[in-house]
Image (spheres, rainbow, N blue to C red):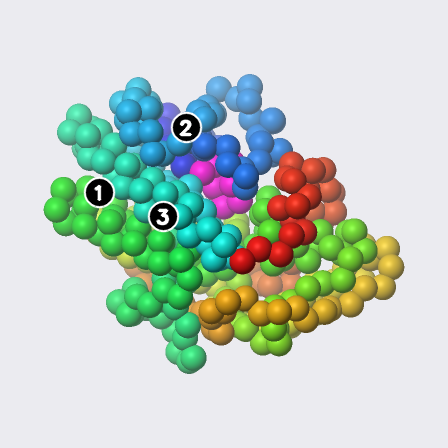
Amino acid sequence: MNKIVVTGGLGFIGSNLIELLLEKNFYVINIDSCGYASSSYNFNQYNKIKNYKFVKVDLNNKSKVLKILNTHKPKGIFHLAASTHVDRSIENPKDFITNNILATYNLLESIREYSKINKKYKLIHVSTDEIYGDLVKGKASENSYINPSSPYAASKASSNHLVTSYVRTFKLNAVITNSSNNYGPRQHPEKLIPKLIYNILNSKNLPIYGSGNNIREWMYVKDHCNALLKIFKKGKKGQIYNIGSGKLVSNLYLSKKILNLSRKKKILKKDIKIIHVKDRVGHDFRYSLNSLKLKKKIKWKNKTNLTNGLIKTLDWYFKNQNFFKEFKKNDITRRIG
């Protein structure tokens, strides 16, 4: 049975990826530091499964990470552990330097040691479209200028550069992926879509930054995970792959759509409205990815349209409202940054 290490597996994308890997009969070792955004809510069912193992460890503890690699000898390492909330990076940039840059450095050093005894492995370093910065028009390709705006985006761009340098200098077998905004089950409610759903379920108005005209490219998390698995199987050493849905909408449009779907599904307990709040500092207006390389080279395509994805997401949070109890209420409701 092929063994896979997933870093940040108690987080949003990591937990959904592990679910897919277990379905495909991989043996999964989940490494997570159990930070504020981690949730064990969805993994109680896996604790007794023979092909799943959880290890609490900080990636900055190189000796423990190396021990895990040497013990389990994984063929794949999916690196998703990261601090990801832009607002938090504005409030406290240092955490993002530690968790995104230094942690990636220590993971790379561990893999460099591990590669001396096991050459049959591949690292998938998962990153974001935000490294390309604000795009007034057009789409960012893998060769586009790196122009991050927030400390979060800068920390992810830095980690990407580290991976690229380790591929060239130390011959690590690694690829980089940059994905558009994800949504779906298990996402921390500090992020836009689950926060809107949390407010709807609690009969609170929906706060939108500024005019709400900022544009994002949205992708259902299960589609992203399928892309990551295909890249693990077919991706070439040293390559970068953009993963996007091609579906661009404004935050205001998205909020109205979620509100309307909630009305149709009769989730709303009482009438609430969208309210505009003070904009985020340095708020990028638009992100958009060119994902042609992934579609042509890896033969992947996005399968879930926005409406169906949002319905699935609404249904999950409605049926799993105890998920919100995993987090401090202040981490959900407080305005940060």
Which residue shows up at 51% across the image and 41% down it? 11
Give the image location of residue 59, x and y in percent: 36, 34
Q: Amino acid at mark 1?
A: Asn
Q: In the structure shown, which secondary structural element does the residue marked by tag 1 occupy?
A: loop
Which residue shows up at 41% across the image and 75% down it? 135
Q: Would residue 161 be found to the left or right of residue 100 on screen?
A: left
Q: Would residue 127 be found to the left or right of residue 188 on screen?
A: left
Give the residue pinned by disc 3.
97
Give the residue pinned by disc 1.
173
Disc assigned to residue 57: 2
Give the image location of residue 214, x and y in percent: 54, 73
Which residue shows up at 55% across the image and 19% down it? 48
Residue in the foreground of this view, choosing between 334 and 68: 334
160 lies above or below 148: above
Nearer the observer, disc 2 or disc 3? 3
Which mark is first along the chain, 3 or 2?
Answer: 2
The quadrant holding residue 336 is bottom right
Report the predominant secondary structure element of the magenta stretch.
helix
Residue sitting farthest toward the left: 169
The quarter of the picture where the C terminus appears is bottom right
